[in-house]
Amino acid sequence: MGRPPYCDKGGVKKGPWTPEEDLILVSYIQEHGPGNWKAVPTNTGLMRCSKSCRLRWTNYLRPGIKRGSFTEPEEKLIIHLQALLGNRWAAIASYLPERTDNDIKNYWNTHLKKKLKKLQSSNDSSMSRGLSSNQSISKGQWERRLQTDIHMAKQALREALSLGETNLLTELMKPSNGSYSSTRPSQPATSSSATTYASSTENISRLLEGWMKNTPKPRAAQANSESTQHSISKAVGTDSSSSEEETASVANNGRTAVPNLFESLLNFDSSTPELSETSLFQCESRPSSEAQVPLSLLETWLLDEGFGQGEMELIDMPLGEF
DNA sequence: AATCGCACCAACCGCTGCCCA
DNA sequence: ATGGGCAGCGGTTGGTGCGAT
């Protein structure tokens, strides 16, 4: 129906956010918490629509966001979840609490799609040499193979963990240096926009530091602000905190802390109380909205110890629908 | 050195669903 | 029951940087 576009009002700024705007937004959210986005432009004086503010926060400024290349376990998890859930990036992102749906979506579109295409084409050629086609695989076989793949992903996670939690987190958090480096690891922070932003964000970091020292806040906001500052500092590589802090749980905004997540992933207990018919997709809404990521039926299925055991011969089956 | 094409990602757009009056 | 307002989501686009030619 003809509802006018929400951000169609005149005088609404579009385009990249400036560090100053970021600072204003972060400061406001630290004080008031995320939510009630409609009030944000009004109360902050930002010439942005509420939607833009929300996006900027959830995709960039929100504490606990991991920036940097995707690790192999993450990659596998995304592939499997995409096979299971389709392009429901928010649902997928709920299993990777440090990644935003936007990030995952971008990563999928720019990296994984191609990767899988390649994989598929190479597989097609092997199929033409006598292997059965995807389409001819029975549903049961398909599911079993998928389960095997998932089991392997899980295995990879566990292996990573077995190196020690710190190592895992190091792995999971690398490079945590503020700019995406997935396929451009050497991209210098000297690219014009990056430079401008990085240096300005450094300023934000410093400003926030001072601001936090001087501004008394409610407890919740304070906790939030610390992690936010940490996040921003991290994002610009100015974080001087110890590695302990680095690996410390970043329970912020109700999002599941990393160690907790992996604890939940790896110590999965099938007697999870949340198990219910309706729980299958209960993680679809962003975990940023309050609760810890509950273990859903899907997680059960994904991570159940018993799954995939003895099915290792079914590895590397290409995932269809890519 | 200049140009072109590609890759990447932040941000926008538009739709959907939920909540509330 | 209904309609408006808002948040959330997925698809798409535009700007920027890099590498190849």
Image (tube, coloured by chain):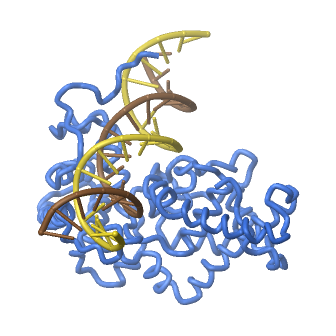
Chain colours: A blue, B brown, C yellow
Q: Is residue A217 above or below residue A266?
A: above
Q: Give residue A58's position: percent from left, percent from top.
A: 37, 51
Frontmost residue, A311 versus A170: A311
Q: Give residue A275's position: percent from left, percent from top.
A: 72, 55
Q: Is residue A124 visible?
A: yes
- In the image as oriented, which residue stretches furthest toward the bottom? A163
Q: Give residue A199's position: percent from left, percent from top.
A: 14, 67
Please identify the quadrant where the C terminus of chain A is shown: bottom right
- Can you tell which quarter of the image residue A221 is in? bottom left
Residue under the point 45% across and 56% down:
A106
Frontmost residue, A318 versus A295: A318
Q: Give residue A130's position: percent from left, percent from top.
A: 85, 70
- Can you tell which quarter of the image residue A13 is in? top left
Frontmost residue, A69 versus A55: A69
Relative to A253, A17 lies left or right: left
Q: Is residue A296 above or below residue A2?
A: below
Residue under the point 34% across and 84% down:
A243
Residue under the point 41% across and 71% down:
A182
Residue under the point 57% across and 48% down:
A88
Frontmost residue, A83 versus A282: A83
Marker count (numbered): 0
Q: Is residue A197 above or below residue A152?
A: above
Q: Is residue A254 visible?
A: no
